[in-house]
Amino acid sequence: MDYGHLTPPTMASRIPLPQISSRAWEHPADRAALNTLRALPGFDEIVRKVAGFFGERGIRQLFLGDSVKVSATQRPRLNVMWTEVIETLDWPERPELYVTQTPIVNAMAVGFDHPFVIVHSGMLETLNDDELRTVLGHELGHIMSGHTTYSTIAIILLYFGLSNLPFLAAAAILPFQLALLEWHRKSEFSADRAGLLVAQDLNVSMSTEMKLAGGREFGDELRVEEFIRQAEQYETGGGAWDTILKILNTVMRTHPMHTVRAAELLRWYRSGEYEAILAGNYLRRGQSDQDQPLSDDYVDAAGYYGSKTRETVDTIKDGFNRARDAVNSAWRNR
């Protein structure tokens, strides 16, 4: 089965997307989850407290203790690649890019006022140049969508734990934490689309998800088609109990399963929206780019998922409603 171009486009053939708005690729479930999160009582206060405790400088110290800043003379090939990504999405700013030594295959965009991108050295060892460009596009997508303030707080709450943040009440923050992580997982779907728009080759995006799930070839053979079949089987297979287990397996994760991400990206590709964007039919920055009401985001999300997964969207709404009630109650009784 053909999932996209067989040969990745060169920089000369890659289509630039002038003035593209992040709204052009944002997943409706991402917008619905984030807007619901913002509606939680006490949300703004928690954001201010966490951001104020660490501060912009503290965040940089937290994440950049062991790293190398990429520049024209420091990892110049990666620096050129980063330039290509920024030019493809026509982003007027140049976020700082760092590489940190760790075998964990990951990358992240973090920060409050001036977000920056960190790539783990394990990512450089696992992916080829085209796949790495996809990851960089993914991280720039997070920055362009304004995700980094909330994703940074999600990472802090997950890895630092409640006991290390004494200014937050555990009873009030736990439902907030669960809702925040739920949004964070949905934000990955949006950023994956940005990565595809940078790669402009579905095979590359699919092979990226495959290697992030299972590593590189190590002298063996990897087939994108087999991984796609596995992804579709994971998403559609099993009964009600399997669905519950899938939810329990991801509830404290910052990222969805890579098979789920691959299937979700393939669904967007097949919808025709990706090709429309490459053809120039997309929302520009500043062009009717106001946030739409939360109810409209839920309608978009439900319509996007279709009849089977509309139940999932309803579950998200119910979960956020329960979190809202729990936070509201805890805030009143502080």
Image (spheres, rainbow, N blue to C red):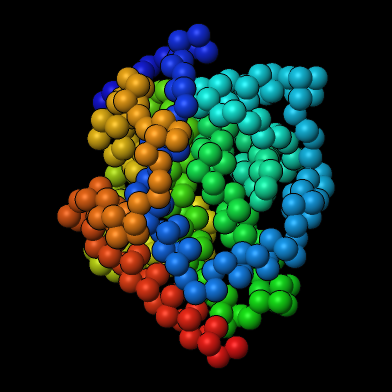
Residue 160 lies, with reference to residue 256, above or below; the image says: below
Residue drawn at (56%, 36%), measured in percent from left and top?
Answer: 140
Given residues 78 and 206, the one toward you in this image is 78
**Farthest residue toward the top?**
12
Residue 93 or 136: which is nearer the viewer?
93
- Displayed quadrant of residue 156: bottom right
The structure residue drawn at horizontal position 43% and vertical position 16%, both measured from the top left corner, is 15
Q: Whole-percent x and y of residue 102?
A: 72, 43
Query: In the shown orientation, is residue 321 left or right of residue 221?
Result: left
Residue at horizontal 73%, vertical 77%? Answer: 166
Residue at far bottom of view: 333
**Residue 267 in view of the camera:** yes
Q: Judge whether 300 appears above or below 159 on screen.
A: above
Residue at image point 31% right, 25% down:
281
For this view, does 161 lie left or right of residue 216? Answer: right
Q: Is residue 238 left or right of residue 254?
A: left
**Quadrant into which the N terminus falls:** top left
Answer whether residue 135 is visible to the viewer in this image.
no
- Image quarter in which the C terminus is found: bottom right
Query: Which residue is at the far left?
Result: 307
Task: Name above or below for residue 298 compared with residue 172.
Answer: above
Name the foreground residue: 151 vs 124: 151
- Estimate the x, y position of residue 189 in percent, counting from the top left: 42, 45
Name the spot of residue 81 as percent of width and height, x first: 62, 21
Q: Position of residue 51 (x, y in %)?
A: 69, 61
